[in-house]
Amino acid sequence: MAQRVFFATSEVYPFSKSGGLGDVMGALPLAMHKNGIPTTVISPFYGRISTSNYQIRLTITDLPVGYPWAPITADVYEADYHGVSLYFIHRGEYFDRRFYYNDPKGDYFDNAERFIFFCRAAISLMERLGQPPAIVHAHDWQTALLPAYIHFLRRWNPFWEHTGTVCTIHNLAFQGRFSSRLFADSGLPAEAWNMNGVEYFGDINMLKGGIAYADAVSTVSPSYAREILTEKFGCGLDGILRSREADLHGVLNGADYVVWNPDDDPYLPCRFSADDMSGKRRCKKHLMAELGLDPELADRPLLGFIGRLRGQKGIDLLNSIIPELMRLNVGLVVLGEGNFVHEARLMDLMEDYRGRLAAVIGYTEDLAHRMQAASDIFLMPSRYEPCGLTQMYALRYGAPPVATAVGGLRDTIVPWPSDESTGFIFTESEPMAFLAAIREAVALWTEKPEYWQSMMRRAMNQAFTWENACKQYAEIYRRIRLRI
Ligand code: ADP
Ligand code: GLC
């Protein structure tokens, strides 16, 4: 494919990241590039991005963006990241903020405007660059209006006539649903305002726009692709997703083993690998000292949890069983931020179990690496999980996960008991089921150390590479190009 694929995303690691989307957008374009699919990334330029670190250059000033009625302008910064071209769209009033989408008080009031502006600026930019894209690939609600815009542009603007579109859902729960008033601002034609378009119970729903108008829709694991067709996991969009079933794909994410490699991780006090795991014990002792855990617990399993402190991640399930866990005489480390109620509960529990439970509220990239390296057992009781990257990192860092049987967790963990097992899976999102699975893991760790070592080795040797995903996306693009 000589023409380019353009990714549109609200996060791209290492420039911006609030979760797995950032990680994916940092790794997938590079992998595409290596697999012969030239990919360009368009993302917002947030005020917190430093221009000096990656030689980011301001290359376009005052790019006209027809938004909302009277044209306003964007500046465009450019960077080259390991051969991938990145374009960053800047407009201070929208993107020079401390956080990406919300502050502690809640979502930014103008999120709809910010991302309508971003999508329309991306259209202007691609036109300015001069060569029609082969594929525009949008990720999550923030960029999901792009397939809708292109669907209508294709009718009358020859520039877009042969551009195909993909909308990838990284998390169906976040849809970008706003008051109908914003529909007029979106610049979409009136015919998009119907139940098969962007309209959703009288509101505008941006992700629904992507699902309705993209040539293909995908999500980030095969199991989640099946789950979202059901009422239980469909977040109110299962109907429109079922109507697109023939064009819906589940492409499992990969992990970036350059960034997440215990054998070459600059954040760790010592390195280790499947062939020589001795460094892992040192990492554990080091982290226990760093977080003030009782050194006597070094001979007991250390449990770890990293993630957004929200219902999705099952943090309430974990909080509710902490007293029982403590009776198992284990250490527990938690890193996350999110819902104030869960944060406060963790702080209270930490008072009760000082020396055995350490909870760090905040977002700290380096600590996340050290916690993966130090943990013996990784906890991931998600209620739903489109893919999940933290369990993939835990596997690579020799911390077999205890996880719910949902989405990407069931696609990446081979449950015990089996000769191939790499972790523990429980079916019901219930505290007692979670506790029972942890008990099983702790018993195995304690009573069968040799088996545990072999499980760790298997876990560390799992490879969720980006190459497979690239091949699948290439095939999706190829099929779209045959149709348009
Ligand atoms: P999600 O995208 O749903 O949050 P993933 O498992 O796909 O879940 O990715 C989460 C990413 O965010 C991982 O890179 C993880 O290490 C990181 N992460 C989550 N919470 C924190 C935190 N509090 N501090 C540092 N990194 C975090
Ligand atoms: C979302 C999902 C997570 C997935 C990530 C990257 O944040 O919650 O499961 O791994 O996107 O696709």
Image: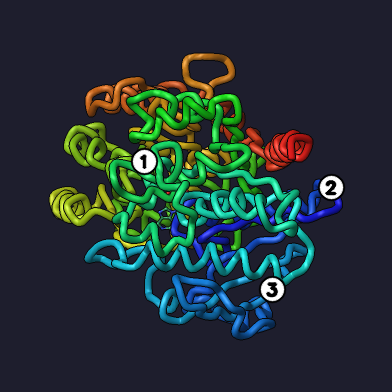
SS under mark 3: strand
Can the viewer see residue 403 in this picture?
A: no
Report whether the residue tagged 3 is closer than 8 Å to ligand 1: no
Q: CA distance from mark 1 to mark 3?
A: 40 Å
Q: Nearer the viewer, mark 2 or mark 3?
A: 2
Q: CA distance from mark 2 to mark 3?
A: 23 Å
**Mark 1, residues whose alpha carbon is within 10 Å: few (<14), some, or many (≥20)?**
many
SS under mark 2: loop
Q: Which residue is mark 3?
A: 79
Q: Position of residue 262 (x, y in %)?
A: 60, 50
Amino acid marked by disc 2? Met
Q: Position of residue 418 (x, y in %)?
A: 53, 14
Q: Nearer the viewer, residue 256 or 58?
A: 58
Q: Nearer the viewer, residue 418 or 343?
A: 343
Whichever of labels 2 and 3 marks the residue nearer the N terminus, that label is 2
Q: Nearer the viewer, mark 1 or mark 2?
A: 2
Residue drawn at x 64%, y 46% is 165
Quadrant for the C terminus, please.
Answer: top right
Disc number for residue 303: 1
**Mark 3, residues whose alpha carbon is within 10 Å: few (<14), some, or many (≥20)?**
some
Residue drawn at x 44%, y 39% is 376
Can the viewer see residue 22 in this picture?
A: yes
Q: Is residue 436 above or below residue 369?
A: above
Q: Is residue 106 left or right of residue 95?
A: left
Q: Which residue is mark 2?
A: 1
Q: Nearer the viewer, mark 1 or mark 3?
A: 3
Amino acid marked by disc 3? Ala
Q: Is residue 269 above or below residue 44?
A: above
